[in-house]
Amino acid sequence: MVLNLRPKCANLSCAESFDWLAGGKLFRFPRKQHELPPAVKNNSESGSHSIGHFWLSERCSNVFTLRDEHGRGFVILPLGPELPAAKDNLHWPLL
C-alpha cells in the first residue's frame, strides 16, 4: 500500500501541495518535548526530528503567517490588521 504523504499548505482551507518551484514560505519551529515521537525522546543523539516544518503556499503567504503561541501551539494569523465589520446603514449613492 502506497500513501500520498506529500505535504500541503498549513492553511487548512488551501489544498495547494508543496512544491519548491511554486513559491510560498517555509517555517521551522522547535517542537516541544511532549510533541516528539518516543524514539526521538529516548535517543539523545538524534535531534533531526526536534524541528517542525510548515509551509504556506504563495497565495496564503501573502495574506497569512504562522506563529507559535504559548498554550495554543502553532496558529495561522493574518499579516495585516483585520478590517472592522461593515455597518448595515452604509449605501452607495445613487447616480
Image: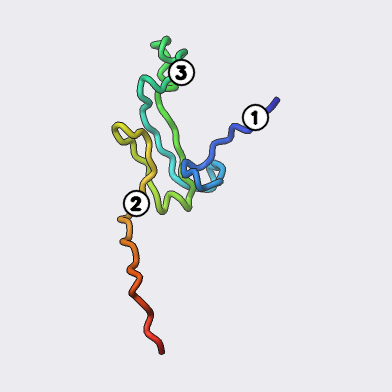
Residue 10 spot, x, y in % from top left: 47, 41
Residue 52 spot, x, y in % from top left: 42, 29
Give the residue pinned by disc 1. 3
Residue extending furthest toward the right: 1
Q: What distance separates the C-alpha of mark 2 from that of mark 3?
A: 32 Å
Label placed on residue 37? 3
For mark 2, does the 10 Å Cα neighbourhood hold few (<14), some (14 to 19), or many (20 or more) residues? few
Quarter assignment of residue 51 = top left
Q: What distance separates the C-alpha of mark 3 from that of mark 1?
A: 20 Å
Q: Nearer the viewer, residue 46 or 80?
A: 80
Does residue 6 appear left or right of residue 28 in this picture?
right
Q: What distance separates the C-alpha of mark 1 from that of mark 2?
A: 34 Å
Going by the numbered disc 1, the residue's amino acid type is Leu
Residue 95 spot, x, y in % from top left: 41, 89
Going by the numbered disc 3, the residue's amino acid type is Pro
For mark 3, does the 10 Å Cα neighbourhood hold few (<14), some (14 to 19), or many (20 or more) residues? few
Q: Describe the element under mark 2 as helix, strand or loop.
A: loop
Q: Residue at x 32, y 55 (%)?
A: 80
Quarter assignment of residue 73 = top left
Q: Residue at x 34, y 39 (%)?
A: 67
Going by the numbered disc 2, the residue's amino acid type is Leu
Q: Residue at x 49, y 47 (%)?
A: 57
Going from the N terminus, do you reach mark 3 or mark 1 first? 1
Going from the N terminus, do you reach mark 1 or mark 2 first? 1
Q: Describe the element under mark 1 as helix, strand or loop.
A: loop
Image quadrant occupied by the N terminus: top right
Give the residue pinned by disc 2. 79
